[in-house]
Image (cartoon, coloured by chain):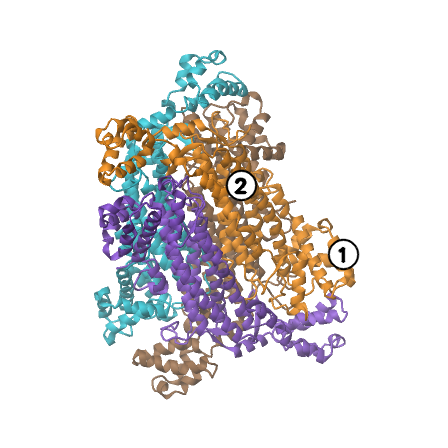
Chain colours: A orange, B brown, C cyan, D purple
Amino acid sequence: MAFSPLDSTLLGPLFTTPEMAAVFSDRAYVLALLRVETALAKALFRLGRAPAGLAEALAALQPEAFDLNEIGRQTGRAGVPIIPFVAAVRRRLPPEFEPAFHAGATTQDISDSALVVQMRAAFALIAADAAAVIAGLAALANRHRLLPCIGRTYLQHAAPITFGFKAAIWLYGIAEVCEALPDLQRRVLVASLGGPVGTLAGLGSDGPALAAAFAEALGLGSAPIAWHTRRAAIVETGQWLNRLIGALAKFARDVVLLSASETAEVSEPLVVGRGGSSAMPHKRNPVLSENLCGLARLVRGMVTPALENVALWHERDISHSSVERMIAPDSTITLDFALARLTQLVDGLVVYPDNMAKNLARLGGLIHSQRVLLALTEKGLARDEAYVLVQRNAMPVWQGDGDFLERLKGDPAVTRVLGAGELEALFELSYHLRHVDTIFEKVFG
Amino acid sequence: MAFSPLDSTLLGPLFTTPEMAAVFSDRAYVLALLRVETALAKALFRLGRAPAGLAEALAALQPEAFDLNEIGRQTGRAGVPIIPFVAAVRRRLPPEFEPAFHAGATTQDISDSALVVQMRAAFALIAADAAAVIAGLAALANRHRLLPCIGRTYLQHAAPITFGFKAAIWLYGIAEVCEALPDLQRRVLVASLGGPVGTLAGLGSDGPALAAAFAEALGLGSAPIAWHTRRAAIVETGQWLNRLIGALAKFARDVVLLSASETAEVSEPLVVGRGGSSAMPHKRNPVLSENLCGLARLVRGMVTPALENVALWHERDISHSSVERMIAPDSTITLDFALARLTQLVDGLVVYPDNMAKNLARLGGLIHSQRVLLALTEKGLARDEAYVLVQRNAMPVWQGDGDFLERLKGDPAVTRVLGAGELEALFELSYHLRHVDTIFEKVFG
Amino acid sequence: MAFSPLDSTLLGPLFTTPEMAAVFSDRAYVLALLRVETALAKALFRLGRAPAGLAEALAALQPEAFDLNEIGRQTGRAGVPIIPFVAAVRRRLPPEFEPAFHAGATTQDISDSALVVQMRAAFALIAADAAAVIAGLAALANRHRLLPCIGRTYLQHAAPITFGFKAAIWLYGIAEVCEALPDLQRRVLVASLGGPVGTLAGLGSDGPALAAAFAEALGLGSAPIAWHTRRAAIVETGQWLNRLIGALAKFARDVVLLSASETAEVSEPLVVGRGGSSAMPHKRNPVLSENLCGLARLVRGMVTPALENVALWHERDISHSSVERMIAPDSTITLDFALARLTQLVDGLVVYPDNMAKNLARLGGLIHSQRVLLALTEKGLARDEAYVLVQRNAMPVWQGDGDFLERLKGDPAVTRVLGAGELEALFELSYHLRHVDTIFEKVFG
Amino acid sequence: MAFSPLDSTLLGPLFTTPEMAAVFSDRAYVLALLRVETALAKALFRLGRAPAGLAEALAALQPEAFDLNEIGRQTGRAGVPIIPFVAAVRRRLPPEFEPAFHAGATTQDISDSALVVQMRAAFALIAADAAAVIAGLAALANRHRLLPCIGRTYLQHAAPITFGFKAAIWLYGIAEVCEALPDLQRRVLVASLGGPVGTLAGLGSDGPALAAAFAEALGLGSAPIAWHTRRAAIVETGQWLNRLIGALAKFARDVVLLSASETAEVSEPLVVGRGGSSAMPHKRNPVLSENLCGLARLVRGMVTPALENVALWHERDISHSSVERMIAPDSTITLDFALARLTQLVDGLVVYPDNMAKNLARLGGLIHSQRVLLALTEKGLARDEAYVLVQRNAMPVWQGDGDFLERLKGDPAVTRVLGAGELEALFELSYHLRHVDTIFEKVFG
């Protein structure tokens, strides 16, 4: 019975998508290893150094053919899974294929190349799931492009925005991280074949050609020099995941804040059995969003150990492998789960325009004070003088007494400068929305 | 088929002990939840507010009675496992028990108390496994109490020590962290029963007495005020695990360094199938130790998210729960595995006294230069003058030319101050070992 | 002109208290080093191995006597400040004192002992400043012990609490961390005197006695075995600071949330020139609190490197020193600044009881639904049946239509079970406050 | 007197370069702010909305004209430095310039744009200093392209490499991180001008054009939508610095390891007054390298807080500012110092080819066992059979008894398959070096 939260029957549904779990299952790992050995066999064959049948024999092997329990036990003893895996494969090959099998490779060549093959699949899932979130946010943004709501700084009402503008910021924060993915993939999706110390010496007199053919067979890039102790691209992957989940958490955090009982501008999709409280039947807990905020902390933590992996020792140093074996699945699974949840959240987000309007009005018009201040100075008042006029009308309103526009209209020192019509114009929401279309063009154009 | 490294058939043996895995299995989690609900029933009964049979009925329930797949599915929907769990238990209780079941508790009371119950079991395993490591190191230290070897600063030969002294530092580094465990447990092993906002209001007019009886029934401490958003003790647990694995990694790191081909003062236990290289039959890779160094990075990373959990919001904020659900099992399992491996390492460590002697002699006696310097100044030479004498004899030796003692004996400016016998005495190892017994008394006394 | 934010004329006032800055000034560091050398001289004298005058001569030296620029330049070259410092002191001593000066100590003994001396002063400041925050929160809690406000879970209105209860949770979160300080100090405030590899060999035949006398002269504890590469206590200090600033940030975060324009239950002290906005004259930005939330992140980050310092190499390994030289001042200064700001915040916090009452009423009585549910089941209704009754009256209210109590009174299926008086009693706030006094006794008693 | 290590007279030389310190001095900060306000004035003028003289008046202001102590004091009160800075500038402007000054900008627009201006200067320094390190390593690599030394895995001798190959790995690890800088700069070096909530509303009817003109005047990029709460590029900068210092630390760590007394293949440049020990005149402590390893931990820690800055709240949230104000200077200064030190280290590194040869021979030829194994199987022996032959000759040699080649020559089971000449050929170093030129072409070509 599983015990880690990711694999747990009980808790897994709070951390894991089946699709990404399949990328990192034991079966998938064995398949990736077999695929790597097959590619090596193909490359050797191409250079005339392996029989044609070896690659076919390896490609025909299925994970089910192996006793994973036994390999696991030997892994515990050997300290690395590749040694027992290679031995198990060798036992399944006809003797004539043996010399060419795994020839010249070091264990780390196999496990690093397999890791990259798995990461390629992980990236593909993440890219697709991120695209779904972005599409959802684009629809949300465009649907509410001109729906006014209050903009907030430090949770204080500042000036009007639109809900679509807010969604566009969420979207752009996620999209700009995703834009860096192709470059990242180019750096990460690189095969490893250098032999124990990376010199290619054991790969034969045509070692460099073999390494190139191997990378090509895997559809991966080729490194100019061994990356056994150069893990910057792996680290960068973790850092990228980190920025991505940060951008997701920005959205989730805002949803939690907007769902506050006092604010109530949005709520999570109402799903039977979710977010309710057995004790408090009126509760609409934003559990998807809160969950995401926690997941972001987890992914942040997962990446920290990777940073220590950059300064590895000499030509090889196995200390990074425990770290990468853990964080590669854990961080991508957690992230993919976050993306899947976010799609649900975006697509089902309930928006309350009435409450947005109520909140816009909540401060009695004070959110327009900046415009009033500006208008007074534009009419020639000194800045300090204008400030005094605004403040003496704003303060009572802030204390709950009256409406800012009405007060201004009743202050002769103000009306001497600004007529009633001019004052009313300063309170129009359209002023704040006038550049939203231009901004949308830049974001979506 | 599992995919997370911890549960993986293939990789689990590099991360997990079966004993700690059992503490956090789905089965154990359900048992902990049942135990907590049973304790609540007992407390209610004691205050005359639940029928006698409720606690017995709950205590009789076994995890096998529940459809964990179904609860898992509902957990994915509800966002927390307690809501479907409570519903599933309720369905198994006779109707007359229903009103008293789970009365007054909030979901977080149940899950926090269950977490603490699981942590108690985790602490017990860790304490026992740490004691085994400490006992092993004590035996190692005492066995080699007076075995001389070189002491190193920045990997440079500095002055002689004994291998037992070195082991005593390893031991004390681990032991001093373990000494803090009882205090930590006192702070962590505290029941939670406060209701949704921690006021005890829903627990009845005798709420405080109920909370105390509940804690007593679980054998846990009782908090003066709700800890729903006070997670310092949980964070401290992670920090303690962090210091502990750091102390283990100090030992492991030194073993890797001492195993270097050039140094070769120790090697890991020779076990068939471990640490060898398919490619390089002479290799004795320190895989246990390297593995441990990687695990230490992992645990460090696991704890980072916990630190963000301290500043939770208002009376409850579920964002910490994803984090704690992950790091509680992951960090304790990883740590327990590290302890188990370390016991193997300590108990089987191969020590090479001949190589220690060779290394002590490697610098041609230069490691005694400090004593010579001191002796010259004690004989009345000015410090600068003495320094010059030492340096002019030391530098050729450092460049591989001759032996320091012989050179000194041949330098009249030296022998004018220190006779041959005096010089020889300065090269005696016993000088460096004279306080080792006193230090051992302090460490082991 | 300074450039680091801590020393910056412009930005320093956002990070630094003058008191803690004085603890870590260059002057204070030199004084600490002199104090350590003086203690060594006293210890040597006590064992008859130094002339009486040495300690006096050292104690008489003032930092002003040294050319710090020159020592700094040499430090850049030497890699450690102690070597040029010792040379500079030596030049100021009469020749007859020279042999006994610094005798037997290694540079790390001096710098570690000086670090501890500075940390002792830092702890004293922190303890005093934390006590001020706690006292302020105690006054706040007691002043508002029975002031009702809404309790929130995930920012959703859950059930009533009192503002004093909330403050008591803030207070207890800080106080419980502070309670661990004496134990921590006992572990950290320990002198170092072991010589280059910690064997005490170079300290003479009475080395252990010398080390004890040295520790006593400094008023510090004495380590059973060298802590050159055992940094757990230093790490623990960082972890403790981390928990402390986390507890402070919990309070600050809640203040930000409670200050939100829609919530407006508290605001930061109104100080001329603070938190206002040049553009928006009505703004009351919670700048003290927001600042604190950022500082908490900083301190979290500062501690991370310390965790890597536990696994140091062999008998000495200077890699920790850059880390500790930076995080000791930076984290304690930041923390002390946070405490100083928090005292201002607590003492001047503006509380708006009217808004608390408004917010309590905001959901039309729905926050009492749990009690209604319970009362219905206590009257014999099945749980599901009761839930339906509550939900059908709650949902319209949640959608803004009517008052929950009035609706219940109008639902015959409800009134058949609960009379109007009984229903009204269920909406009384006093129910939720009934255990607050008991809780206060536990927290403050 | 300064107290933070970075500004400290005593410790600063271990953390800081004067060039980078100048980028972040108070003076430079005020200049950056003035430059940003000047750019805004130019943009306003271009759109006909400011008098020509405003930009000139602002450009003419010097930091020396301001009372930084007073601005600092007000900053402590205001919580942000921009408010008192803007007021101080305003007081220095003729009244007719006042209305256009700072028009439409929010404080964060100014401080973010100034941060970016400072970061541009910081990137330029880092790029130049990294180029110097890379050039130094390229010279080192080419100088020792074919100097044989042992390659190590887990500190165990594995197979021969060349010292130039090792240096090429160091170089490529640094260079590949530097290659990502232009892309990063494109993402980071972006102006901010959006007004308080980012809608450009307050910037006038031609707000978008003004924002574009402003960015152009600063020579910065222009964001499609406000980045007040989108900090991914800032975070990415920290992550990049982290990867860079990791790559530097890889080199430094290897230098420490290669300098070990037993290994002694390199040493740090011998500089009078550095790395020596007052107590141990023969010591050559690798202080530059050890220092770098500590600095890498520091930078790792500095970046952690940035990761939490991604999930900021709503349209603005000042909590990131304390973090960025600290980590921008601290991390770039520390990194630049690391680069400067590394250049010294690379340029002056002392290489000991004799010791490399000695170490290559240390295992009695066992490092060639892999080739022997391969040759035996290529001659038709089964792998297991060949392994037995290799092991039975290797083990005695590993235990210090004899030479591997001689033993093989004396084992008839071996010589039956491989003649003496064939065996000798297997021990030739040239085999291991045969692809080094090709690899160099890829790295340097």
Q: Given the current orientation, which residue lies at the most extreme front position?
A: D48
Name the chain letter of the residue that bears numbered label 1: A
Callout 1–callout 2 Cβ contact below 8 Å: no
In this view, D173 is above or below A350:
below
Residue topped by disc 2: A134
Determine if residue C289 is in view.
Answer: yes
Bin the neighbour count of mark 2 within 10 Å (Cα to Cα): few under 14, some 14-19, many 20 and up: many
- The image quadrant where one finds the N terminus of chain C is bottom left
On the image, the x and y values in percent for residue B246 come to: 47, 55
On the image, the x and y values in percent for residue C387 come to: 51, 21
Q: Nearer the viewer, residue A59 or B305?
A: A59
Name the chain letter of the residue that bears numbered label 2: A
Q: Nearer the viewer, mark 1 or mark 2?
A: 2
Residue topped by disc 1: A57
Looking at the rendered structure, the secondary structure element under dot 1 is: helix
Q: Residue at x 27, y 49 (%)?
A: D85
Quarter occupied by residue C444: top left
Quarter occupied by residue C188: bottom left
User: In the rendered structure, which amino acid carries the disc numbered 2?
Assistant: Ile
User: In the rendered structure, which amino acid carries the disc numbered 1?
Assistant: Ala
Looking at the rendered structure, the secondary structure element under dot 2 is: helix
Q: Nearer the viewer, residue C359 or B339?
A: C359
Upstream in sequence: badge 1 or badge 2: 1
Q: Residue at x 35, y 25 (%)?
A: C358
Calculate the distance from the C-alpha at mark 1 to the C-alpha at mark 2. 43 Å
Bin the neighbour count of mark 1 within 10 Å (Cα to Cα): few under 14, some 14-19, many 20 and up: some
Quarter occupied by residue C441: top left
